Image (cartoon, rainbow, N blue to C red):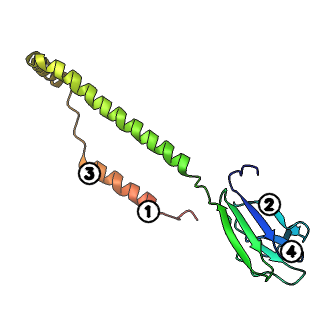
Amino acid sequence: MAHLLVNTARLSIESFYGQTIYVFWQSDECYKCLPLLLFSLSPTDPKNSTVLFTSYSSTTFLRLGQNETLNCNTPSLQNQAEYLIQVFENKSCHTTTITPAKNEYHPLVAVLLAQLIIVYLMRRGVIIWENYFAGDTMASGEGIRSTNENALDRLQETTPQAPRRLRSLDTFRGLSLFLMVFVNYGGGM
């Protein structure tokens, strides 16, 4: 059998019943639609299978004739799973899952875990790198400390002090913004 694609499932039906069985399919989203005949199982050809889409929920049911529906519990079709329905002579059915559904999120989880491991290793590498070079520069720590203090003094001398803002002006701006946005909401209608 061919490989199943994403959002498909294989439904196989095997009949041990002596009459023709009709297999119908109907989408659960379309409640006024007529059932679609998938295939029929005759006593001379008692096995058949089909591939159905699992994107939308659907119902598969079996009929013996125009009005008689077999009381079979058809499975809820899941992604890339294979099901077998066996119909016996006493009009009973047995449903078997041949291949269980595949989880389509496994590759996504694997990629996410790989990215988390890479980020973790990069962060640990940066920490190790900083500690390695911090150990080399600590040997001449006295010279670095004096250079940093001189640079800090020069930076403070050259930086002009910013003028102080008026609190009343900020308060007025805040109140006017509040009035424009919240009080006049819907005023243009």
Q: Earlier in the sequence, mark 3 or mark 4?
A: 4
Q: Earlier in the sequence, mark 3 or mark 1?
A: 3
Residue at mark 4: 21
Dot 2 alpha-carbon crowd within 10 angstroms: few under 14, some 14 to 19, many 20 or more: few
Decide which of 48, 145 is in the foreground and name it: 48
Is the residue 140 above or below the residue 67 in the image? above
Image quarter of the C terminus = bottom right
Residue depth check, mark 4 versus mark 2: number of the one nearer the observer: 4
Side (left or right) of 158 relative to 56: left
Dot 1 alpha-carbon crowd within 10 angstroms: few under 14, some 14 to 19, many 20 or more: few
Which secondary structure, mark 2? strand
Residue depth check, mark 3 versus mark 1: number of the one nearer the observer: 1
Q: Point out residue 186 in the picture as x, y percentages from the top left corner.
A: 53, 65
Q: CA distance from mark 3 to mark 2?
A: 77 Å
Q: Point out residue 20 in the picture as x, y percentages from the top left corner.
A: 90, 74
- The amino acid sitting under disc 4 is Ile
Residue at mark 1: 182
Q: CA distance from mark 4 to mark 1?
A: 69 Å
Side (left or right) of 84 relative to 166: right
Residue at mark 3: 168
Side (left or right) of 71 relative to 138: right
- The amino acid sitting under disc 3 is Ser
Dot 4 alpha-carbon crowd within 10 angstroms: few under 14, some 14 to 19, many 20 or more: many
Dot 3 alpha-carbon crowd within 10 angstroms: few under 14, some 14 to 19, many 20 or more: few
Q: Point out residue 136 in the picture as x, y percentages from the top left corner.
A: 18, 18
Residue at mark 2: 50
Q: CA distance from mark 2 to mark 1?
A: 61 Å
